[in-house]
Structure formats: C-alpha cells, structure tokens
Image (cartoon, grey):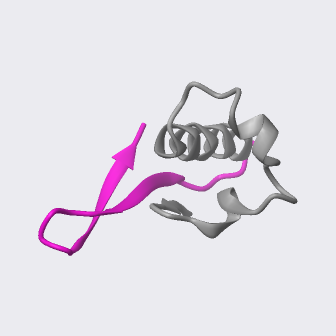
Amino acid sequence: MIAIAHEDCAWYSEERFVPPFLQKFGVRSLKERQREDLREIVQALRRLGLPITIEAYYAEKSPDGRVRFVREV
C-alpha cells in the first residue's frame, strides 16, 4: 500500500476539519503537520498486522515546477 500526502492539500484548509482558532496554536508548519499525520496513519495501518508492505510519501513541488515524492520513514 502506498500512502501519499501532498503539498497544498485543501483538506487542511477546511474549517470544518481544522478550525482556524486551532491552527493558530500549532507551532508546526502545514507541511510538518501533514507529514506527521502521514506517519501516524502508516503506524495505525501497521498495527492492524496485515501482511502488506506500507510506504508513505509526501508530494511537493520542486523549484522547477515538477512534483517530487519524498519518502517518509
């Protein structure tokens, strides 16, 4: 299984999911939050004990405009 989080994900800007007043309290950047969430879901999937390989990637725009995938641990 491959889990992917991506830069500028609209889910994180939706007030119904992350109210603005809560966003103010976080010292992490949006990218850090997304990457942490990605690692947490991978850990949760692994705890299920399924006989599958799980990989996680963060997709972001590189300076040249291309999308690059950064593998998460």
Q: Quadrant of residue 68?
A: bottom left
Magenta segment includes 34: no
Question: At 32% from the left edge and 52% from the top edge, which residue is drawn?
Answer: 70
33 lies left or right of 70:
right
Can residue 48 be seen? no
Question: At 54% from the left edge and 30% from the top edge, which residue is drawn?
Answer: 28
Quadrant, the N terminus: bottom right
Instruction: Tell me where residue 59 appears, x and y as whole percent.
Output: 39, 62
Identify which residue, 30 or 34, lies in the foreground: 30
Report the span colored magenta. 49-73
Q: Quadrant of residue 17?
A: bottom right
Identify which residue, 37 or 12, lies in the foreground: 12
Identify which residue, 2 or 34, lies in the foreground: 34
Instruction: Tell me where residue 34 appears, x and y as whole percent.
Output: 56, 47
Can residue 12 be seen? yes
Q: Is residue 29 above or below residue 9?
A: above
Question: At 69% from the left edge and 64% from the top edge, which residue is drawn?
Answer: 11
User: Hey, which residue is sitting farthest bottom in the picture?
Assistant: 66
Q: Is residue 24 above or below residue 6?
A: above
Q: Is residue 9 above or below residue 38?
A: below
Instruction: Tell me where residue 2 appears, x and y as whole percent.
Output: 51, 63
Instruction: Tell me where residue 22 appears, x and y as whole percent.
Output: 78, 36
User: Hey, which residue is sitting farthest left in the picture?
Assistant: 64
